[in-house]
Image (tube, rainbow, N blue to C red):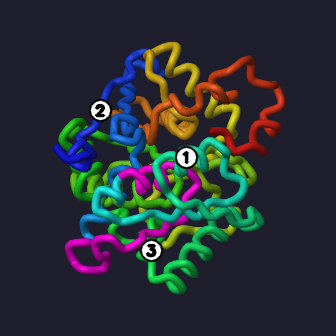
């Protein structure tokens, strides 16, 4: 069985002990069950296969991508299955654990300055592709990203929870909420699509604030019913609550999604809310997400990229 065949078809589980009121049911899509532990396995496997099929990517050609973590890791594992070496461009603010993981999987890592965050890494990846003939995966701009979620993640949610009323997702590339959102709107035009977005300056792994100047081209803002800003401390507390109440070890971006879902639920009397848990919490066990008491000053947590 090929590794890529294990991507997707992840569990959708109800969080009965986290429901804020009797009429509101919470469901979590557990993307940490993918082979490398995150939702990014979906887009990487899909985008590589599409590019190979239509000739954009040649077998053995180097693949380059900008990433702060999970996409780079997924690429480092899946691209070599096609004989393609991998180069990942990361901002220098990326945690050491990210770089170590990428190197362990055999990726070549290029670090760029952190002045403009992921935007600097995207520009550097484009320059590498142009200069060295590498194939740019381009998760932030390729239409294959939301198409993957439309065809797979969205369809799985409709199948697992046909009565979905609200979908809450962290804001990263924008591909997940755009692709899933389009599929859910076809199923139920009244479904509400809510993005969990970090405060400007916050460094929640995998999530980005649009106020920092980089709006991913694949993100369709017109689809959104609303955005909820989440501080790191609130995301960490929510992740700890999910662990305590449900026994699920979820990452900090999943905690942000839970926090946003509970805030959105305040305005609803009855609803089925599906939440995107983009990865599991194993890689964050030694971070403040799960270690020690959280400081009263939430802003002190917003300044560090936790991994």
Question: What span is colored magenta in the figure?
Answer: 51-77
Q: Position of residue 1 (x, y in %)?
A: 16, 43
Instruction: Please name the residue shown 42% across and 43% down the image.
Output: 38
**To which residue does mark 1 refer?**
196
Residue 177 lies, in percent from the top left, at: 41, 55
Which residue is rendered at x = 55% and y = 59% of the image?
67
Which label sits in the foreground, 3 or 1? 3
Residue displayed at 66% across by 51% down: 94
In this rendering, the answer to whether 244 lies above or below 41 is: above
For disc 2, the marked residue is 12
Residue for badge 3: 136
Percent from the top left, x then y, of residue 305?
69, 44
CB under 8 Å between discs 2 and 1: no
- Which of the two residues, 224 or 173, is positioned nearer the viewer here? 173
Residue at 61% across, 76% down:
123
Q: Position of residue 109 (x, y in %)?
A: 58, 60
């Amino acid at each position: 069985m090929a590794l890529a065949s294990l991507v997707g078809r992840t569990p959708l589980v109800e969080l009965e002990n986290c429901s804020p009121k009797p009429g509101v049911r919470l469901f979590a899509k557990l993307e940490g069950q993918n082979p490398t532990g995150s939702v990014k396995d979906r887009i990487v496997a899909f985008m590589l296969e599409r590019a190979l099929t239509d000739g954009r990517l040649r077998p053995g050609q180097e693949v380059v991508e900008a990433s702060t973590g999970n996409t780079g890791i997924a690429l480092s594992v899946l691209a070599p299955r096609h004989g393609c070496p991998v180069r990942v461009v990361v901002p220098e603010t990326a945690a050491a654990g990210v770089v170590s993981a990428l190197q362990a999987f055999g990726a070549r890592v290029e670090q760029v300055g952190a002045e403009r965050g992921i935007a600097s890494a995207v520009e550097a990846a484009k320059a590498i592709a142009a200069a060295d003939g590498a194939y740019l995966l381009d998760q932030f701009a390729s239409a294959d990203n939301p198409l993957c979620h439309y065809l797979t993640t969205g369809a799985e949610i409709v199948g697992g929870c046909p009565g979905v009323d609200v979908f809450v997702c962290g804001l990263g590339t924008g591909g997940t909420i755009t692709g899933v959102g389009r599929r859910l709107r076809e199923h139920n035009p009244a479904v509400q699509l809510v993005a969990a977005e970090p405060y400007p300056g916050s460094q929640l792994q995998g999530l980005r604030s649009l106020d920092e100047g980089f709006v991913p081209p694949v993100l369709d803002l017109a689809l959104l019913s609303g955005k909820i800003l989440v501080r790191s401390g609130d995301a960490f507390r929510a992740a700890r609550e999910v662990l305590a109440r449900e026994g699920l070890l979820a990452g900090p971006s999943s905690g942000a999604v839970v926090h946003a879902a509970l805030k959105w639920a305040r305005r609803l009397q009855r609803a089925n809310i599906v939440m995107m848990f983009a990865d599991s919490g194993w890689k964050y066990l030694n971070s403040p997400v799960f270690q020690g008491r959280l400081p009263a000053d939430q802003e002190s947590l917003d300044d560090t990229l936790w991994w």
